[in-house]
Amino acid sequence: MSIVKVALPVPKRQLFDYLSNGLEVPVGGRVRVSFANRTLVGVVMAHTDDSPWADKLKAVSEVLDEAPVLDEHWLTLARWLADYYLHPIGDVIHTLLPVALRKGASALPQDTECLALTPTGQQHCQDDLRRAPQQWRLIARLKDGPVALHTLREDISSAVIRACRDKGLVETTLQAYAVQSDWHAALTISDKPRPNTEQALAISAITRDLEAYTPVLLEGVTGSGKTEVYLQSIEAILKAGRQVLILVPEIGLTPQTVQRFQRRFGIDVGVLHSNLNDNQRLRVWQQARSGELGIVIGTRSAIFTPLAKPGMIIVDEEHDGSFKQQDGLRYHARDFAVVRAKMEGVPLILGTATPSLETLNNALQGRYQHLTLHARAGVATHTVQQVMDIKDQPLRVGIAPGLIERMRSHFAAGQQVMLFINRRGYAPALLCHHCGHIETCHRCERPFTVHKQLNKIQCHHCSAARPLPRQCGACGNDEIVPKGVGTEQLDAELASIFPHISRVRIDSDSVRGKSTLEEVLAAINEGRHQLLIGTQILSKGHHFPNVTLVVIVDADGALFSADFRAAEHLAQLITQLSGRAGRADKPGEMWLQTHHPGHPLLQDLLHNGYGHFARFALQERKAAGLPPFQYQVLIRAEATDARSPFAFLDELATLLRQQTDFQVLGPVPALMEKRQGRYRVQLLLQSTRRGVIQAWLATNMATFERLPSVRKVRWSIDVDPQDFM
DNA sequence: GGCATTAAGACC
DNA sequence: GTCTTAATGCCC
C-alpha cells in the first residue's frame, strides 16, 4: 500500500496517514486532504507502506505540488524547530510556509499583471501631457516595455493609472514571470568608502571562508561604521554568486535602509515587512528560493525565507526583543539564524552596539568571534551621561527644575531636546481624590490609562476602552484626578512651560502607520520641531544629529523590576538613546532622572560603559543561577477561572519532580496574573543543560496531554523565554 | 484548531 | 417536554 504521512495545521503532536492511491506525491510537497469533515492543506513528511489506521485511511484528495515546497534541508530545519521548541510539527510546517501557500495557492511562478503602452500611448510625448506631469511620468516609465503593476504601485498612484487607462494610453497585459534573474551580472559597486583598520579587519574576518559557518558578534556603536562592514562583507558574498539574508527589528525596516543596499549594489532587494499582502510575500519567497534575488531583507519571520545559494545571514540589532515570537511557535529568529547558518555553512553576523547577555556570553566563551568597532574620529563623540537625583525635588510633570533650565538653554542655543518616557497616553491611572478608588479594567485587573485627547480611558493590556468618567465609579464623587505622567501629559504641560517651542509627540498613538513616522522624523531633522517627546520608538534606529539633550524621565521602574532582564534592557535603552543624539561638533548630554542615584547598576553603566556593565551583569547572572548560565523552559497555562491553571500545573509539577536533572520552580502566577479576562499561571524549568529538559518533556508529552486537568486550560511551552509577563 | 456529538440549563 | 448553550471528544 502506498501511504503518505502528512503534517497538518492542527495542534496535535503527530502526523496523519493518507492513501496516495498511485498519485505522484513528493516528500515536502503539499496535498489537500479531508480531515474531520473539512479540507486542509498539509505537507507530506514521508512515504510508508503500512499504517495502524489501515482500515480507516482516507485518500489524498488533491496533490498541490509536483515538486516539494520544502526540500530535505527545510524539512530537517522544521524537525529541528519542532524538537527544540517542543511545538507540534504540523504547526511548524504551517508557520514556515508563506500564507498564500498555506491556503493552497500555486507555488509556481504566476504570470504577473503588467501595464503596457497602447499604440496611442506610444505616440504621446511630454507636450501632450503638459498639464498632467504624473501621467507623463507613468508613460515615460513604460517606454522601455511593460512593467509589473505591483512595482508601479510603489510610486505611482492608482488614480494616475486609472486616468491613463481611461484615456486609452495604457492597458493591462499578462507577462510571463521574469525578474532580474541574473543579478550577478547586473552587480555594480558604487561609492565604496575605504574601510578603516578596524572595519577592514572585521570584513576580512567575516569573509575569510565564504563556505564555512563563521559566527561573528560585531559590536559597534552608532557612527562606528557597522553598516559599512555589512556592505563590504555582502559585496564579497554577492560577487561569489551567493545570496544574503538580512534580519532587522520591526521598526528598523525603513525605505532608507533598503535604498542603501540597493544603491550600493545596483540590484533589486527583496523586502519582507508586516504590511505586505499574501501574494507580495509569496513573490519574494519564490524569487529568493529560485535565486533571483541577491539580497533579502526582512523582520523576524524573514528567517524562514529559503535561498537557492545561501551565502550569509546578518542579524542587525541582535539584542532587539522583536526577534522573539510570542505566540504559536515561540522561536527566536536570532537563535534560529545561528542554527541555520551552521547548517548551511555560511558566515553569520550578529551586529549591535549593545549585545544581549546571551550573545555576549557566547562571544566571551569563544563560540563567536568578537569584533569591536570604535567610533570613528570626527564622526560621533560620546554623549555625556549623568544622573539627576530627583529625591525631594519639586517636579513639574515629573521633571526636575534643573532640567527644565537645561532644556531652556539648549533651546536658546537653537538645539533640539528629547524626552523619553515609557508610557503613552495622558496618565497611567485615574484616581478618586475622595475615596482613593482607581478605575480598573476588570479583564486585566490593571488601572486604565487616561487618554485625555480621545476623551476616554483605555486598558493597555487588552485595549478595552470607555468614555472618560466624570465621577468616581465607586463613590460618585466628581473629584477624580489623573495619576502619574504619560507622553500626552508631558506634551500638554510642556506647552505651557515652553509656549514658543514647537513640540512633537512620537508614540504609537500619535504616529499611525509607517509613512507618518517617516514624515515626522524628516520634519525633526529639518529642524521643524525643537522638542521631541516619545516612547521606545525613539530608541530604534533613527539618528537625530541636532538633539543635544536627552532626558530619561523615569529610570527607576527598571531598577527594581521583577523581570531579571529589566536592567539589561534599561542599559541597552540608555546606550541606544545616547547613540541617537548629537554629532562631532555638537556633543550631546543625557540625564537620567532617578530616586536612586547611587544604584550600582547605573553607576557602572555611566562610568564604565555598556561593555563593562554587561560583563558585570553576566557575573551577577552566573551567581544568581540565571540565563545564560542556566537554561529555562517556561510552561504557561491560562483559563477564565483562577483554579484550573493551578490545578493543571500542580499536577505537571508533581510529574516533573519525579526527576532530579533539572529544577522545577512554581507554579506561580504570571507577572500579569490576569489578562484579557484570563488567569495566567506558569511553571519554570531550569537547568545547566537545556537538552535534558527538552528530552524529558518530549518523552512525557503524551502523559501531560492525557491529564484530565489539561482540558480546562490553554497551555503552551516557551523554550528560552524572554519575558515573564 | 474546528466541528459534531452529547450533556446540561432555561423556560413553558 | 423542547430549544439553546456549554463541555467533550475526535480527526488519519
Image: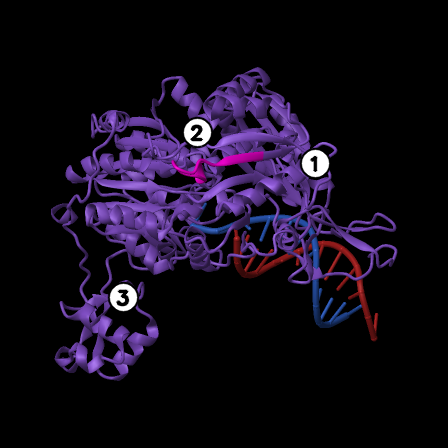
Chain colours: A purple, B red, C blue
Q: If the image is split into quadrants, where does the C terminus of chain A sit?
A: top right
Residue type, label 1: Phe
Residue A603 percent location from the top left of the image: 57, 23
Q: Which of A684 and A211 is in front in this view?
A: A211
**Residue annotated with mark 2:** A355
Task: Report whether mark 1 lies on the same chain as mark 3.
Answer: yes
The residue carrying pointer 1 sits among few (fewer than 14), some (14 to 19) or many (20 or more) residues within 10 Å by Cα, namely many
Rounded to the nearest whole Å, what is the CA distance between mark 2 and mark 3?
40 Å
Residue A586 painted magenta: yes
Q: Which of marks 2 and 3 is nearer the N terminus?
A: 3
Secondary structure of the residue carrying tag 2 is loop
Rounded to the nearest whole Å, what is the CA distance between mark 1 and mark 3?
56 Å
* 1 or 3: mark nearer the eye: 3
The picture quadrant where one finds residue A209 is: top left
Q: Which region shows up in magenta?
A: A579-591
Magenta span: helix, strand or loop, mainly? loop
The picture quadrant where one finds residue A230 is: top left
Residue A392 lies left or right of residue A648; in this view the side is right
Q: Nearer the viewer, residue A75 or A246?
A: A246
Question: Can you say whether A120 is above or below A424 in the image?
Answer: below
Q: Earlier in the sequence, mark 2 or mark 1?
A: 2
Rounded to the nearest whole Å, what is the CA distance between mark 2 and mark 1?
36 Å
Label 1 resides on the chain identified as A
**Residue annotated with mark 3:** A152
Question: Can you say whether A36 is above or below A2 in the image?
Answer: below
User: What mark, if any, has residue A614 been given in the picture?
Assistant: none
Q: Which of marks 1 and 3 is nearer the N terminus?
A: 3
Residue type, label 2: Pro
Q: Which of A490 and A57 is in front in this view?
A: A490
User: What mark, if any, has residue A646 been given in the picture?
Assistant: 1
